[in-house]
Image: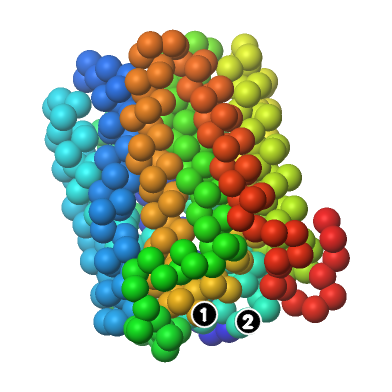
């Protein structure tokens, strides 16, 4: 493992995700102040991901051929520019369009960062290093809402967009100055099609789980702030504290990632998904800050158990089918969930109320886990010798 490259990579990712976390949870509230319907709120959240659905496969394949650094830097630049655009949005349509553009930057940055990490990860340690990476990534996303809530209360929601632009510009500078292009693991991938990784049952199972996980994340990020604001009556600062609870829980991925190298990855995904599903179903019954916080933490804890194990499957298959292509397929699955999920959930909320969003997300997780269990056979883990059953 090239630890210097790892530190630079995760450092720039943390800065970028902190900026994203400052803004994303408060976009639904901002859209609501501009007169957006629940469906439009879903589109604001989904625009970020819908762009990725059409671009991720090509970006991953191109990064396998031309290198990761170009795409990492371009993505950060686009995110910074679109953040400035969000500051001047005056209508829900403006927010939706800028989020589509921002999604292009995210498509060129986040999955390629994971592919870069896959390139430098030693075989047999996929869970460990992906766990560290995800812990830092989600810690940045989790700390962002707290900072965003404080900034919003002290200044305005629009000021959070400026902070997001500045933080992503800093991450861009760090990437340009300190991150070197590394040897890419693509030797067999050049002869294969975009969809060749789907031959792997393990990868198909991981994709099914990640689509459901994307819907879960969409439900949390787009509608928990609205639920906390409109139903529970929390201030922006308390909403920020609520969403920032993701950070300490997500740091557990530095431990659960190491578990995924030794324990049964299949069981980790299933048990983690079941915990998230149960907490989603209980979330609408939360009548105050503390019950809502407990349900939110439980959903995040389930993700902290399942995501590193699913990531480990993907990195292993990436050595066969091309790291960029395999990782971007995994990210594409997430974008399908976070892109289509908010639109569907927004339509459901307009018709049946906010509580129905979380019940629907729980059903999606149940379907994703069922498909994962069918695709990934017991004993299919390709982990280090001496693994223990969970």
**How far from the left and from the top, in percent, is residue 52?**
30, 52
Query: How many numbered discs sit on the rendered protein?
Result: 2
Q: Position of residue 132 (x, y in %)?
A: 61, 64
> In the image, which is nearer the foreground, mark 1 or mark 2?
1
In percent of width and height, residue 243 lies at 53, 34
> Measured along the vertical axis of the image, is residue 199 above or below residue 305?
below
| Residue at 46% across, 64% down | 198
Residue 87's quadrant in the figure?
A: top left
Mark linked to residue 319:
1
Q: Quadrant of the C terminus?
A: bottom right
Q: Position of residue 154 (x, y in %)?
A: 37, 29
Q: Which mark is residue 119?
A: none
User: Which residue is disc 2 drawn over?
Assistant: 123
Q: In which quadrant of the rendered image does the N terminus lie?
A: bottom right
- Quarter residue 89 falls in: top left
Residues at marks 1 and 2 touching, judged by CB atoms closer than 8 Å: yes
């Amino acid at each position: 493992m090239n630890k210097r490259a790892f530190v630079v990579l995760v450092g720039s990712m943390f800065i970028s995700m902190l900026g994203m976390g400052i803004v994303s949870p408060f976009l639904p509230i901002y859209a609501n102040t501009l007169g957006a319907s629940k469906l439009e709120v879903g589109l604001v959240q989904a625009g970020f991901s819908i762009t990725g659905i059409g671009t991720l496969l090509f970006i991953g394949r191109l990064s396998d051929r031309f290198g990761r650094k170009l795409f990492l830097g371009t993505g950060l630049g686009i995110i910074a520019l679109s953040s400035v655009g969000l500051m001047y949005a005056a209508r829900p349509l403006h927010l939706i369009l800028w989020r589509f553009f921002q999604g292009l930057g995210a498509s060129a940055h986040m999955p390629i960062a994971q592919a870069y990490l896959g390139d430098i990860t030693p075989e047999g340690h996929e869970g460990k290093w992906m766990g560290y990476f995800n812990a830092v990534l989600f810690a940045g996303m989790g700390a962002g809402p707290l900072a965003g809530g404080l900034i919003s209360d002290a200044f305005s929601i629009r000021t959070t967009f400026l902070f997001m632009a500045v933080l992503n510009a800093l991450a861009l500078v760090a990437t340009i100055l300190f991150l070197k292009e590394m040897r890419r693991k693509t030797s067999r991938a050049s002869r294969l099609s975009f969809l060749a990784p789907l031959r792997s049952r393990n990868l198909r199972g991981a994709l099914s789980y990640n689509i459901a996980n994307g819907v879960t994340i969409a439900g949390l990020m787009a509608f928990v702030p609205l639920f906390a604001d409109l139903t529970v009556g929390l201030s922006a600062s308390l909403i920020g504290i609520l969403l920032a609870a993701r950070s300490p829980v997500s740091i557990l991925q530095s431990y659960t990632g190491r578990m995924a190298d030794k324990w049964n990855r299949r069981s980790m995904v299933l048990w983690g998904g079941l915990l998230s599903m149960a907490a989603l179903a209980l979330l609408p019954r939360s009548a105050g800050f503390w019950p809502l916080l407990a349900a939110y933490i439980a959903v995040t804890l389930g993700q902290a158990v399942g995501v590193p194990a699913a990531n480990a499957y993907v990195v292993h298959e990436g050595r066969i089918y091309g790291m960029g292509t395999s990782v971007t397929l995994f990210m594409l699955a997430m974008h399908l969930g976070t892109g289509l999920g908010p639109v569907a959930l927004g339509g459901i909320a307009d018709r049946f109320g906010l509580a129905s969003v979380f019940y629907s997300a729980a059903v999606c997780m149940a379907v994703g886990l069922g498909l994962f269990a069918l695709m990934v056979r017991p004993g299919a883990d390709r982990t280090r010798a001496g693994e223990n059953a969970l």
